[in-house]
Image (cartoon, rainbow, N blue to C red):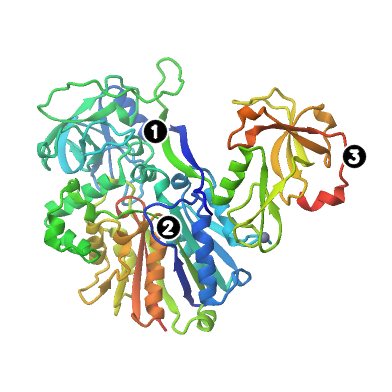
Amino acid sequence: MTETPLAAPLNVGFDYTRSTGPVLGRFVNALRDRRIEGIRGSDGRVHVPPVEYDPVTAEQLSEFVPVAEEGTVVSWSWCPRPLDGQPLNRPFAWALVKLDGADTPMLHAVDAGEPGNIHSGQRVRVRWADEVVGHIRDIAYFLPVDAEDTTPTQPAPPVADREEGAPVSVVITPVHLKYLHSASPEESTYLRGLAEGKLIGQRCPACGKVYIPPRGACPTDGVPTTEEVELPDTGIVTTFCIVNVPFLGQRIKPPYVAAYILLDGADIAFLHLVLGCAAEDVKMGMRVRAAWKPRDEWWTSLENISHFEPTGEPDAAYETFAHHL
Amino acid sequence: MPDVAIAGFAKAPNVRETEGTTNGVEMLVPIFAEVFAQTGLSKQDIDFWCSGSSDYLAGRAFSFIAAVDAIGAFPPIHESHVEMDAAWALYEAWLKIKMGEVETALVYGFGKSSAGQLRRVLALQLDPYVVTPLWPDSVSIAGIQARLGLEAGLWSEKDLAEVAARGTTQDVAELLDTPYYADPLRKHDIAPITDGAAVIVLSTVERAREIVERPAVITGIEHRVDSPVLGARDLTRSPSTEAAGKALDLDGVDLAELHAPFTHQELILRSALGLGDGVKINPSGGALAANPMFSAGLARIGEAAIRIHSGESRKAVAHATSGPALQQNLVTVLEAR
Ligand SMILES: [Zn+2]
């Protein structure tokens, strides 16, 4: 492989939405009132944050115990390069903090400025978020007890819809992850071909099947496909469905046809659109041709083909594609 | 119930970053070929396939499905997957053979840690209500664990550097002279980010004898879990490793492969398993040399097994961990029999 595989940023994001139940629900509702509640374990220890089941005996727990918003650092580590989403965007300490009245420490951030300003045994207090919503992030971070609140806290996480005055029963945590997604060498050849208006498949050296997109490994033989095969932009519909249901992000007005297209000379079908005829006229075996977007819109994407449309030729006989279904 | 042995092991080159896809195919195809050449088996000889990997590491759902292509999975195969280190996939495969359901199994794990921001991605293994929303990173959690032991006098920074020195050309004094990376941890205390994959062939002992002269017989395998509540655990110990070790016969162990992504964790594990000075620790270099996520634990078992195959060890213990601060631990005893 002479050219490096294509790679591009892939950003994944969703709001992780969870119902809280009675124990965590009580905890986050107290946070919204700027109070902290722990729970008594089977051995009498007070756990903060509260746990639903005893960490040792797995017994269900229910005895809530209010604790202070001041406590003691049990252990810490310095975070010189904060990551996205962490409680502070300047260097800070992660710490296990045992709040007064609690027996187990909780993990949180301490805004200490530099490592010389924190030590185990240090007294710290909660810096409440400027806006409290019923979420662990209502505790913005901890501060040395005598330090001043100087800077504004980070924005509150999103809140689930609920009726006026209703308690918090759902917490939302936005999750955003960044990746560098790499295509395989075989996929890269295919994607670079698309940018030139070519449909490049590859043949498995073991079984001779032609795959488009080509595979990092043939699912029959477990070896990468190698020999390049340029395929025509004509083929048949092997199977299809008529989309009647509207959904978020839909780009075409229903009804329309999503179909598996088997290009002439290929051994695997791929999903695309069939437009240019009434949805009810699409049939298995129907001959279709690619409708390309204007050349100046081409890039390394199958989106260069806007859709497939009927050629008007006679349908392929079922037996010729039955083994591709 | 049949006894189970390890008949083959191969691993991908452990590198900081590959150009490959997150589905691992590029790393897996060559090591499947290698392990088949080594054992003389072909894919038709494998009765059960089991893998370990992570969608969060790959950044997409059902990422392990694409990896199945590397097997050449048509006609259909008997396959399973765990969203953990593949050492736990090996446990599942071990059970399948024990139950008499299959005679051979191939276990593989893979991960492209370099695709995302590893220490942030791993925050998703934590409690989703009160811990993950703070995005604590894996290095910081380990740092808190390390300091607890440092301040309790259970180990010193010099002890940690001695663990690291085994795998470097630098001596302890030079290592201690380097700055903190994340106080109290220095770079040498932290496993490198690694892309990698590993594969193990398991079979009944009878079958393994046809493949290797000295099969590594699994004479014990146990796994245990500690509470996910970090504050409720004594982080200077690994009660789950201790419990797994107690359920096994570790007498006469001469070699240990320990999955310790941080120097202090190796000390915790040695103590949890009661390994004395006579036991050779991590001849492979361990996770501090290379820590490919979701296959490093499986690789510990494979590294121990090949040392039984070669005659370097008579009885070895292999340990794998998954989750933050040694939360889940699996211990395997391998013997030449
Ligand atoms: Zn093939």
Query: What numbered label is drawn on residue B41?
Result: none
Q: Please name the residue shown 44% across and 33% down the image.
A: A18
Q: Residue at x 47, y 32 (%)?
A: A14
A247 vs B318: above or below: above
Q: In terms of depth relative to the viewer, which is nearer, A244 or B11?
A: B11
- Mark-to-mark CA distance, 2 and 1: 43 Å
Mark 3–mark 2 Cα distance, whole angstroms, equals 51 Å
Residue B126: name its quadrant: top left
User: What is the chain identity of the residue bearing mark 2?
Assistant: B
Residue at disc 1, secondary structure:
helix
In terms of depth relative to the viewer, which is nearer, B320 or B312? B312
**Residue occupied by mark 1:** A22
Task: Residue at 40% x, 48% y: name it.
Answer: B114
Residue A1 picture location, percent across and down:
54, 54
Q: Of the residues tagged 2 and 1, which is closer to the observer?
A: 2
Q: Are marks 2 and 1 on the same chain?
A: no
Tell me, yes or no, whether the two marked residues, 3 and 2, touch with CB atoms within 8 Å: no
- Name the side, left or right, on which B100 lies relative to B238: right
**Which residue does the numbered mark 3 point to in the structure image?**
A314
Indicate left or right for A60 with A219 as reference.
Answer: left
Q: Quadrant of residue A258?
A: top right
Quarter holding ligand 1:
bottom right
According to the picture, the residue beneath numbered tag 2 turns out to be B196
